[in-house]
Image: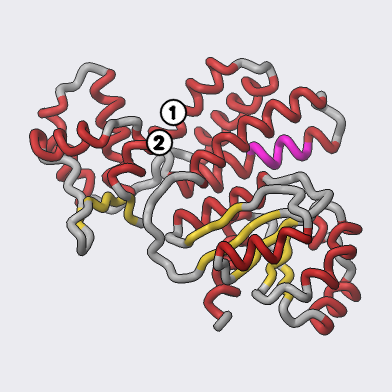
């Protein structure tokens, strides 16, 4: 995955002018160049810049980090941090959010940003936070206000990843949305983030999209695959005939798909050849499924 200088600036907080200055003065990072001469940064460059900022805050001089950069980008990537450490910090973030403690949440989140690549954030942090939130809500262990606060925080953070501007490297484009009555979007946004960071164009139309607006959205965006998520099984059953008329392949996921009976699965597969059921609970594997449908489609 390659990032433009504008995207690296957003990921690290360093202005584009500072990135160019560091490259000239200290010799790092050393981005590749596109055919048009634009800088293209690797994930290792982004990770090193975050490390450099942390070391600078600890008192290290930037000119002393040149050799560290040379060794950093030449080495094979090692595990960024232990799973125990991530799990522990995810719990701290979740508890901070339930207390509405913005300062503590920001402190822990900054550590995630310094240690984890975006794809690791999606799988290890966002997915676990969404799982905890869903479990606690279903058990009645958190209040309505807490659920709204945590989900609002996660939505804003995922939205920041979704709106980062860097050029697509894959030809297939995806549209993602939920239809009328479906308001849960965390898992769908995570799938979109995975696809975006694999180089795909992702058009995200949000939740509760009226079906009357769907065809317009798909046609004007030029999307080639439509991904949709359901929580309510009755909503899924309601929409099947309409979704079957969509002119591009449709991939259906979410917990409602997992709740389908074997008989219903067979009926959908036999009656609706343009609909593809995704039974993956993991957002990363769901993105794999969408990617596979995209590769198989003309």
Colouring method of the image: secondary structure
What residue is shown with label 1?
A: 111
Q: Is residue 232 left or right of residue 153?
A: right
102 w.r.t. 290: above or below: above
Q: Residues within 10 Å of mark 1 (few under 14, many from 20)?
A: few
Pointers 1 and 2 in contact (C-beta within 8 Å) = yes
Name the residue at 81% across, 34% down: 137
The x, y position of residue 258, in whole percent, is: 80, 61
In the rendering, which numbered label is found on residue 50?
Answer: none
Rounded to the nearest angstrom, the CA distance separating label 1 from label 2 is 6 Å
Say which element carries label 2.
helix
Q: Quadrant of the N terminus?
A: bottom left
Query: Where does residue 28 sit, x and y in percent of width and height?
Result: 16, 40
Q: Residue furthest left?
A: 25
Residue beneath the point at 68% across and 76% down: 247
| Image-quadrant location for residue 219 | bottom right
54 left or right of 165 in image: left
Q: Is residue 279 visible?
A: no
* Left or right: residue 150 compared with residue 34: right
Count the numbered circles shown: 2
Q: Residues in magenta?
A: 129-135
Q: Quadrant of the C terminus?
A: bottom right
Main SS class of the magenta portion in the image:
helix
Q: Is residue 133 visible?
A: yes
Does residue 186 lie above or below 102 as drawn? below
Label number found at residue 115: 2
Reply above or below: 184 against 249. above
């Amino acid at each position: 995955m390659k990032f433009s200088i504008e995207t690296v600036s957003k990921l690290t907080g360093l202005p584009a002018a500072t990135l160019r200055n560091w490259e000239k003065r200290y010799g790092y990072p050393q981005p590749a160049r596109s055919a048009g001469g634009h800088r293209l940064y690797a994930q290792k460059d982004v990770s090193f810049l975050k490390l450099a900022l942390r070391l600078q805050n600890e008192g290290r001089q930037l000119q002393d980090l040149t050799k560290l950069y040379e060794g950093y980008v030449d080495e094979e990537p090692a595990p960024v941090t232990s799973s125990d450490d991530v799990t522990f910090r995810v719990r701290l973030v979740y508890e901070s959010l339930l207390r509405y403690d913005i300062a503590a949440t920001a402190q822990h989140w900054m550590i995630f940003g310094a240690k984890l690549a975006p794809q690791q954030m999606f799988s290890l942090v966002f997915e676990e936070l969404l799982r905890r939130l869903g479990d606690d809500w279903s058990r009645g262990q958190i209040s309505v206000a807490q659920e709204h606060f945590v989900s609002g925080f996660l939505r804003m953070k995922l939205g920041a990843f979704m709106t980062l501007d860097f050029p697509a490297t894959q030809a297939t484009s995806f549209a993602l949305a939920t239809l009328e009555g479906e308001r849960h979007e965390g898992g769908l946004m995570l799938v979109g983030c995975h696809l975006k960071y694999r180089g795909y164009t992702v058009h995200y139309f949000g939740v509760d999209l009226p079906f009357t607006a769907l065809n317009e959205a798909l046609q004007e965006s030029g999307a080639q695959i439509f991904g949709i998520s359901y929580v309510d099984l009755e909503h899924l059953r309601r929409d099947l005939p309409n979704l079957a008329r969509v002119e591009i392949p449709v991939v259906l996921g979410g917990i409602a798909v997992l709740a389908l009976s074997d008989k219903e699965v067979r009926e959908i597969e036999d009656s609706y050849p343009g609909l593809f059921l995704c039974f993956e609970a993991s957002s990363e594997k769901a993105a794999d499924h969408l990617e596979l449908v995209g590769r198989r489609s003309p």
